[in-house]
Amino acid sequence: MKFLSSFSFIVSIAIVFGLIIGRIPYGNLIATLSLIGAMSISISNIPLKLKDFDGKKTAIALILNYFFLSSIIILFSLPFRTTPLFPGFIVMAAAPPAVAVLPLSKIAGGNEKLSLFSLVISYMAAMAIMPVLIYIVFLKMVNPLDLLKYVLILILLPIIISRFIIIKHSTDIINIFFFFVMFPIIGANRNFIFTDAETLFTISLMMAFRTILTGWIAKHAMEKRYGRKDAVSYSLFASFKNEGLVMILSASLFGEKAAIPAIIATIFEIAWVAILELKTRFSNRRMP
């Protein structure tokens, strides 16, 4: 049962299962309902209080996620603008940071209060930013009512549900939900993953830079001015997007292949978490 507490382990198993089993019936519906469950439980652990709120620091986190990271994602999307993968990059750029930023801040030794308020503000902003950016780029491809429906279902609905639930051992349950987010989407894209190695390699290089290098740059740029704890939180906002949300929204609006960039990004986000965690443990051991 201890394995259920490891997000990296559960997601890795989901990737393996998806590659072995392939497409399953009602996969997109299963993934959508699982994402709503995972986000609702994750957000339920976030107390929406104004104590210790720092507007300046929160604004920096928002800028890092929605301007610094999103600009890099949009830049990387340009070589794919005539392919089915392009919408996946744009949805990723428009997406808020991962809900997992909050627990990851604790794991990596970041500023949990900073991450908390930055996450809340980011999701409030996402309800406007996501539909506007996606609609501007895909004016003739997206029904604005469908786009608004998905944003309300996948962002606003979990926020509302979260206010009415209290669940013990939530980490294990969230990880199980994420298994059922990843597994069907990986399975639906198995043929592409196995047959287009060149494109997969190119996207992997991009996502490695987009995640690990952007996080490293943000961490070192902020550390001298704001200290290590704030810098760790900033590095997470500069490197993580809600890839589960991106996968569901991309596949629902633009087809299954549009979820590929988010699938690859998830792998490198897991690697970045592992790096931060190892650094934290090493630092703690060196402390007297």
Image (spheres, grey):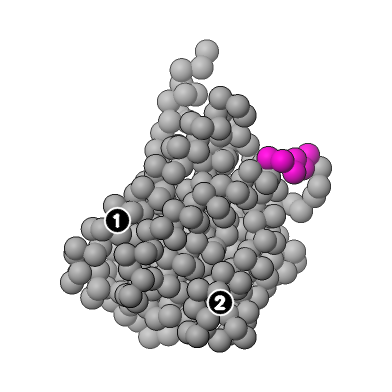
Would residue 262 appear left or right of 165 to someone viewing this image?
left
Report the span colored magenta: 52-57
Q: CA distance from mark 2 to mark 1?
A: 27 Å
Q: Amino acid at mark 2?
A: Tyr
Residue name at image x 19 percent, y 63 percent: 198
For marks 2 and 1, the one nearer the N-term is 2
Check if residue 159 falls in the magenta segment: no
Whether residue 1 can be seen here: no
How many numbered discs? 2
* Residue 242 at x, y percent in the picture: 52, 60
Q: Residues within 10 Å of mark 1 (few under 14, many from 20)?
A: some
* Residue 235 at x, y percent in the picture: 51, 41
Q: Quadrant of residue 130?
A: bottom right
Q: Quadrant of residue 95?
A: bottom right
Check if residue 54 falls in the magenta segment: yes
Mark 2 or 1: the one toward you: 2
Q: Secondary structure at mark 1?
A: helix
190 versus 267 height, above or below: below
Residue name at image x 76 percent, y 53 percent: 48
Q: Quickly name the residue at label 2.
A: 135
